[in-house]
Image: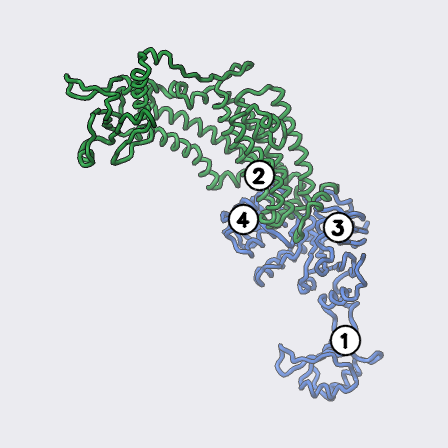
Amino acid sequence: MPTAPALDISGIEKRFGEQCALAGVGFQVPQSGIFGLLGPNGAGKTTLLRMLNGITAPDAGSISFFGEPLTRGHLPTIGYLPEERGLYKSMRVGEQAMYFAQLRGLNKKVAHERLRYWFDRLEVDGWWQKEVGEVSKGMAQKIQFILSVLHEPRLLILDEPLSGFDPINAQRIREVILDLKARGDTTILLSTHDMGSVEEMCDEVALLNRGQLVLNGKVPELREAARDGRYAVSFRDTAMAFTVALGASAELIEVNPNPEVPGEHVAMLRLPAKSDISTWVRWISEKVELTSCTPWRPGMRDIFIRAVEQQQEPVK
Amino acid sequence: MNKLGLIIYREWITRVRRRAFIIGTLMVPVLLALGVGLGAWLENTEMEDNKVMVVDLSGMITFWDDSRQAYLPICSECFPERAHLEYRFSDIALDDDEFLLSDFTSMVLLDDAILQHGQAKNLYEKSPSIAAQNTIERDLSSAIERFKVKEELALDYEAYKRLKTKVSLIGEDIITKDGNATERSIVGFVFSLFMFMQIMVYGMHVMRGVIEEKANRIVEVIISVVRPMELLAGKIIGIGLVGVTQVIALTFLGFLVFQVGGQALEISGLLTSSTNEAVELDFETWMASNDLLGFVLEVNWPLMVVCALGYFTAGFFMYAALFAAIGSAVEQESDAQYLMLPAMLPLFASYITAIMAIQNPEGQVAVIGSYFPLTAPILMLIRLPLGVAWWELVLSLSGVIATAYAFVLVSARIFRTGILMHGKKITVRELFRWVRHD
């Protein structure tokens, strides 16, 4: 019997007055992976995330949570780190962490043990007695992250979890997220505009735009499907010599010096239809010194931009 | 502890442990005690030793006594012996230098013009205290009165004094047999003023708390764990308990100050009989015998405190729900101003009516106001010390509770939508739409 998906979202609709926030959105989030929820600003991501947290209800459609209709009873097993997040400034860090942990249903003893573990792991243990108003923004971000994972949720919803972190702390949080994924008992729903993180961490994505689902699938498959016959060719010569040698054999899209290898250039080109790449490589190698030739796969950033630009007119 | 309990506790503890709250609460009875002590001290020390020379230029109130070789008052009882006031009489005024060299603190010049305009010149180097001036004026008035009675009407002064009548109205409620109505309405006013301040201050706390949670975006995390109604209820109850804590602390501290202050005053010997300064009194007897403070002991304090707590709870819920709704509908405190005005209007109206009601606590405005739910928490407390029928109390308090309940329900609807709204100017029409939307 196949495992039920962590989330089965079907035909979700939501309107705010005249504004249509979600128009029949549906997709599945498989268990125990990292699922990216992508979309430009105003696409309806936050509305959908709020529905998953029981903050708002859909006008139509259904949401299943590990095979059961999602109810408020499931909320204690969901962790949520909203994009716009804050803490009470006049409370001490440890006291506030205990407050949220207990609101999440943990008893004092367990909450205290887990908080000690996470404070130690994310290096905020010296801040327990400090007032939140005294801690840096990055430190507050770490505390908020801890509060979302503390109760070991089955579904962890992270909305822009890396924003506001310096590169070192962003990497630390990234490692924690990947570690949670590796442990296999938490499904992570990651909403972000950072496409580098999506490529690095997400197994699957759904892309929303103007309240509609415009793309959904596994990241490698989406990238493979988005290939358009382009090749990245590296060579040791001048850009001019390569352009002259190329002639009309291929469409040159761009050529730039390789920043990592001095004296080398990288050209992006597309061969005419029905051309054989190996024949072309042999032919051009006689004219310039080639160092590599690889099929170009678009990144998630390109896929994102193309999908959004291609979408039809907004839903009225 | 359940979630509601956790929210209530957080709202309560984060406020009552603030230094400002502790200092503020401790300062009220301390300031009160200081005020009373200062008053008593001033009253005692204000009467510095005064030695007054009364220059009777027309010989109206003095005569020359050969045996004592001094001028003496014709009416000796008009100038009784006083602790801080001593009179000397003469028929010739001292010149300025002589006066400054003498040990007199002031010199009063009396001539027969006083019979026309009732004024006498008082010369001094340092102005005598108001209390001393009042005493001198009273003594001189009696002496002049005696002169007028005897000289102009040819009456016996003792007979005149027997005829002279002063009427005082001693109020008594025909049902409750209670008196001192006006004085006790002042107790009610103090309670209502305190109630007004508590509802205002802690209602604003609720509004600020909601705005803080909304502006800091904490609310999104919290309402993913608890229902908006739980959060609202927890916030109102928690902050309301801060007010109750302050009331309890102030009651306890007030009682303590009353007792300790009373003991201190007893030991200091400052509490003397108003009729005979040589007689020292205990604190309670002094209070009871004091014209200004005696009524304090006649107030039904347990009823006042219980009713004040009841009205505070219901009244606070009513206004706090309103303030919470306003807080949830705005982005920052400055945006709340235009919505605050209609919410505060009944509160201010009650306060103004309360000031007027001191003079006439059973007037129509005060009575109607004490039934109207929005003004009842403040106005009923003015009437309460005078005695209010039980059905009036039940009617009034039930109205406040019912209105508070309705306000909380409406407020919860605004709150649950408003706290997630950002970057949008909210109109009154939109607020109504949120209330209607289920």
Q: Earlier in the sequence, mark 3 or mark 4?
A: 3
Q: What residue lies at 79% left-to-right and 66% top-to-bottom?
A: A310
Q: Position of residue B172 (x, y in %)?
A: 51, 16
SS type, badge 4 = loop
Q: Nearer the viewer, mark 2 or mark 1?
A: 2
Q: What is the three-letter code of the residue carrying label 1?
A: Arg
Give the vertical position of B243 relative to B221 (above or below).
above
State the residue position of label 3: A16
Q: Residues within 10 Å of mark 4 (few under 14, many from 20)?
A: some
Marks 3 and 2 in Cβ contact (< 8 Å): no
Q: Chain of mark 2?
A: B
Disc 3 and disc 2 on one polypeptide chain: no
Distance between the Cα atoms at labels 3 and 2?
A: 31 Å
SS type, badge 1 = strand
Q: What residue lies at 42% left-to-right and 23% top-to-bottom?
A: B293
State the residue position of label 2: B203
Q: What is the three-letter code of the residue carrying label 4?
A: Lys
Which label belongs to residue A89?
Answer: 4
Chain B's colour is green
Disc 2 and disc 1 on one polypeptide chain: no
Q: Residues within 10 Å of mark 2 (few under 14, many from 20)?
A: many
Q: Quadrant of residue A73?
A: top right
